[in-house]
Image: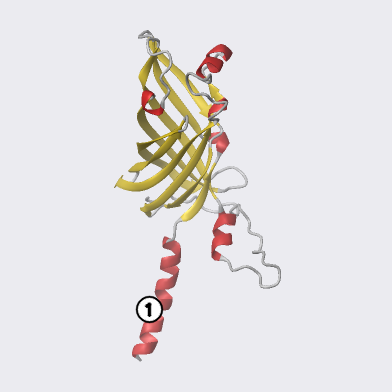
Amino acid sequence: MPVRLTLALLLAAAPIAALAAPQTWRLDPVHTRVLFAVEHAGFSQALGTVSGSEGQLLFDPDDWTGARLTVSVPLQRLDLGDAKWNKAVMAGNLLDTDRHPDARFVSTRVEPVDASHARVFGQLTLRGVTQDVELAVTVNAVKRHPMPPFRRTAGFSATTTLSRKAFGVDGWPSMIGDTVELRIEAEAVRDRNADDMQDTPSDSNTGTPPAANDSDPPPSPPIMKPTP
């Protein structure tokens, strides 16, 4: 009897453990954008955006502590609203995008604050220099997208402040302020292919895991927002 009871408990716990495993999500580059603001000669805050970021997120909405994020930001897609401004900022004395075309962020730990907020710590590499960065992150929603192919989607907002000089971006100090405010709006879609490749053993004959469908079936009743 004790053996049967132990087996029953193990079998009952197995689905719970599987559900608790972090899920793989990938950033949607169309709906992920970095907004930056920096002082322009004391007159105003110059505003710019960078679109097209790509990356992977390992994330369990019920347990943020094991979340991991890797993001690549294509700096040559920077836009200040003027071609001459763009060229000047991407030049060698500032971002030097010819030699350093991407910025890269890799998280190191996540500290939940409450049900929808967390502090994400990590390392940002910009212009070949790596510095520690802390992001204040808000989870806006985790639910099935209302448009086809109805993929499970997570939406996030984040903010942080950087010193550009700390990354060696020190050109034009009398014209451009040192403090750079960042706001990030991001969407990530559930990558079931990646999850299935990790969880499903390879076929013994071909060595290739079975194909997986990246999209969810159309929703029937509305799905309530889960609590992170």
Q: How many labels does the image show?
A: 1
Q: Name the residue under label 1.
A: 9
Amino acid type, callout 1: Leu
Q: In which quarter of the image is the N terminus?
A: bottom left
Residue at 31% in and 47% down: 111
- In the picture as drawn, the residue positioned furthest to the right comes out as 206
Q: Please tell me whether residue 58 is drawn above or below residue 157 in the rendered image.
A: below
Can residue 33 be seen?
Answer: yes
Q: Please tell me whether residue 105 is drawn above or below residue 93 in the rendered image.
A: below
- In the picture as drawn, the residue positioned furthest to the bottom comes out as 1
Where residue 26 sits: x, y (%)? 53, 46
Residue at 57% in and 55% down: 194
Where residue 173 sits: x, y (%)? 38, 13
Residue at 39% in and 24% down: 164
Dot 1: element: helix
**Of residues 89 and 81, which is closer to you in this image?**
89
- From the viewer's perspective, tell me whether residue 149 is left or right of residue 152: right
Q: Quadrant of residue 41?
A: top left
Where residue 52 sits: x, y (%)? 56, 33
- In the picture as drawn, the residue positioned furthest to the left comes out as 113
